Image (cartoon, rainbow, N blue to C red):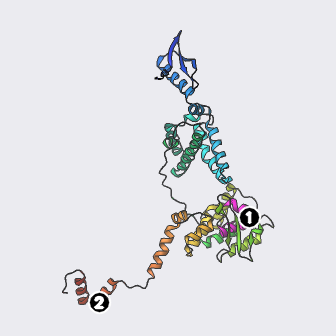
């Protein structure tokens, strides 16, 4: 026996106002005022009321705010074991989403049009395409978590399509060993030791601030970096001949227990810029110091795989992307030192007549 199909929302008037009669998810009939005198507007309200009543996910997306969704995403990443630095990164990238979309706006308001508008605004504000691309990815991941929780009805990949072209160009700013020496001379003893530690280990600013004197074992020839972003960032490194002088500075000017005083990113950039100006070297950040030791290792002929391990990377992808040109130049110098003699050089070395005859033979025109 055929089941009777449930009818859709039905509009009717009470005085000048249109009312709607519709069924909820449990099958009960509901009656609500649309508060509209225009029938077309009342029909749109009726469709929205019915969808809210019959689609739990859509209804949840109207109740969950953008701020709620961001909080849920960060909490989910924390549960999965993301490091504090990673959580701060996500919070920073999603801060603009909260500002532009509105913290208290329903999550359902984030649709393709809203994302396009967000992207245009961020580019107009001067954000680079690379930065906007990272923000878009964070928004898409936030929507994906909300959808899994039944709080967002749309497909996140359709709302924020992947494959954003960001034209990223890795930063290649760095110091030479001579410039690093000039910079160190312009820093106070404590900061000099801190910068020397980064140059000796390629550590990021956060892990370097956690360094302790016990982490430096001169007898064994190792130094511990207390990284936390990934498992590979917590690593024990060898004290190399090129870094031994930096390690000596660390031990000479570092603290007895905790090697260095706290140094925020803002203050570190400020102090380094001032010291660079006095030293008359390019202005650098803590990350540029990390790039400097990386460049020195690559130029010295260290295998990229070993350099990646030294920095705490899980692959050589970033090493090759940033320093591939150095590798190419080194390869060129090595090939130029080759002792193999090309055939064409022999041809040029031959006498004029003999050379011409041999060249003609190679072209297939001489006697056999």
- Residue for badge 2: 350
Residue at image x 64%, y 63%? 232
Residue at image x 75%, y 63%? 260
Q: Nearer the viewer, mark 1 or mark 2?
A: 1
From the viewer's side, name the closer residue of 273 and 82: 82
**Image position, residue 286 (x, y; %):** 64, 61
From the viewer's side, name the closer residue of 76 and 98: 76
Alpha carbon distance from label 1 to label 2:
67 Å
The reply to whether the magenta stretch includes residue 208 is yes
Numbered circles on residues, count: 2
Seen as rendered, the residue at the extreme right is 256
Q: Which mark is residue 163?
A: none
Seen as rendered, the residue at the extreme front is 1
**Image position, residue 284 (x, y; %):** 61, 62
Q: Is residue 48 visible?
A: yes
**Image position, residue 57 (x, y; %):** 57, 34
Q: Which mark is residue 211?
A: 1
Q: Is residue 280 visible?
A: no
As drawn, is 62 to the left or to the right of 266? left
SS assignment at label 2? loop
The magenta span reads 186-209
The reply to whether the magenta stretch includes residue 49 is no
Residue at image x 49%, y 38%? 112
Seen as rendered, the residue at the extreme top is 15
Q: Earlier in the sequence, mark 1 or mark 2?
A: 1
Query: Of helix, strand and loop, which mostly describes the magenta segment?
Result: helix
**Image position, residue 44 (x, y; %):** 49, 23
Quadrant of the rendered image containing residue 341: bottom left
Q: Residues within 10 Å of mark 2 (few under 14, many from 20)?
A: few
Instruction: Tell me: residue 110, above or below residue 320.
Output: above
SS assignment at label 1? loop
């Amino acid at each position: 026996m055929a089941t009777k199909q449930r009818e859709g929302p039905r509009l009717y008037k009470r005085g000048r106002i249109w009312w709607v009669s519709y069924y909820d998810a449990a099958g009960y009939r509901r009656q609500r005022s649309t508060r509209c005198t225009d029938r077309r507007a009342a029909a749109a309200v009726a469709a929205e009321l019915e969808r809210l009543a019959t689609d739990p996910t859509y209804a949840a997306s109207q109740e969950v705010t953008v701020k709620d969704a961001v909080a849920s995403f960060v909490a989910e990443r924390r549960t999965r074991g993301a490091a504090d630095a990673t959580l701060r990164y996500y919070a920073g990238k999603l801060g603009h989403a909260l500002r532009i979309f509105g913290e208290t706006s329903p999550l359902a308001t984030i649709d393709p049009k809203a994302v396009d508008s967000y992207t245009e605004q961020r580019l107009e504000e001067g954000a680079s395409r690379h930065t906007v691309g990272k923000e878009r990815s964070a928004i898409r991941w936030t929507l994906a978590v909300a959808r899994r929780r039944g709080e967002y009805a749309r497909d996140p990949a359709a709302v924020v399509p992947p494959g954003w072209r960001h034209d990223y160009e890795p930063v290649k700013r760095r110091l030479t060993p001579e410039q690093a020496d000039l910079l160190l001379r312009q820093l106070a003893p404590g900061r000099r030791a801190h910068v020397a530690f980064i140059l000796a280990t390629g550590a990021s600013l956060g892990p370097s601030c956690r360094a302790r004197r016990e982490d430096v074992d001169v007898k064994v020839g190792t130094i511990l970096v207390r990284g936390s972003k990934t498992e590979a960032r917590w690593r024990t490194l060898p004290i190399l001949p090129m870094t031994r002088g930096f390690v000596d500075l660390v031990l000479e000017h570092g603290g007895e227990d905790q090697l260095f005083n706290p140094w925020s990113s803002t203050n570190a950039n400020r102090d380094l810029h001032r010291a660079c100006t006095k030293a008359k070297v390019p202005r650098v950040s803590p990350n540029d110091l990390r790039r400097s030791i990386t460049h020195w290792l690559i130029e010295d002929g260290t295998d990229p795989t070993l350099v990646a391990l030294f920095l705490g990377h899980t692959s050589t992808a970033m090493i090759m992307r940033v320093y591939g040109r150095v590798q190419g130049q080194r390869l060129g110098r090595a090939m130029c030192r080759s002792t193999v003699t090309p055939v064409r050089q022999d041809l040029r070395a031959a006498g004029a007549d003999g050379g011409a005859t041999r060249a003609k033979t190679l072209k297939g025109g001489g006697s056999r």
